Amino acid sequence: MARPSQNIDQRLLQAGFELLPESGCRGLSARKLAEHAGVNLGMFHYHFRSKDNFIRTLLAQMYEQMFSELVLQSHASEAPLQNLRNALRVLAHFGRTHQPLLQRIFADALAGERIAAEFLQTNVPRHVRILAGLIGDAQRSGHLVQAPLPQLVAFLGGAVMAPLLLGAAARNAGMLPPGANGIVQREVLSKKAVEQRIEFALRGLSNPDRSTA
């Protein structure tokens, strides 16, 4: 009789989600992962073969879950502006949920870690294409101003995501003045704050000749 599945691969992946933000790609090891997951080291090699393959699998799992939701929500409404709003909410939720890991991946890529750089080079264009398409739809419907797509993508990313990632980085690095952590959490990093920035950004880009949806 076959042994019941113990979800060892998922236990190892969960260990990776917990360890990778601190260790980075270079500092992560199969032994650390196996110990953290409470499994035999041989099981790591059985399921993933190598650390590089493990990191690729972990990052792909994280991203594909978000991307599937992004595609679904970006076509959930007939109103172009609402589809864009939905997509921004998905991306913001992704940033809030995986903020420590995303910051580590960006840092590793800048430091020359090949796997981190490959992940960003492969996947960032995918959600940017979705976002650009939705912006174009909203422009054609008359809801958003006519401006170059790269300019509007950069504006929305800067307005919605940059405060989230930079605010969290400053907080985690102890760079905020005394008593500011709670304010930043409430007014910058919370779901409510992100939702407000989405609305502010869409209003800022709205076509003055047509009311927004």
Image (cartoon, helix red, strand yellow):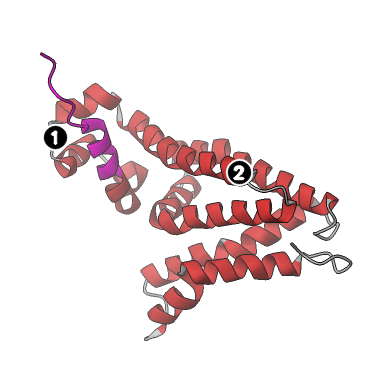
Considering only vertical position in the picture, is 100 above or below 190? above
Give above or below for 44 relative to 89.
above
Tag 1: Cα neighbours inside 10 Å, few (<14), some, or many (≥20)? some
Q: From mark 2 to mark 1, how far is it between C-alphas?
A: 35 Å
Q: Residue at coordinates 39% horizontally, 80% vertically from top-left?
A: 182
Q: Which residue in the protein does label 2 denote? A: 127
Residue 84 in picture, x, y percent from top left: 67, 53
Does the rendering let one see residue 124? no
The residue sitting at the front extreme is 78
Give how far across and how far down residue 126 sits, in percent.
61, 39
Magenta span contains residue 15: yes
Please name whichever residue, 58 or 187, is drawn nearer the observer in this view of the structure: 187
Whichever of callouts 2 and 1 sits on the residue coming sooner in the sequence is: 1
**Magenta-highlighted residues:** 1-16
Discs 2, 1 touching: Cβ within 8 Å: no
Q: Which residue is mark 1?
A: 39
Residue 171 sits above or below residue 87 on the image: below
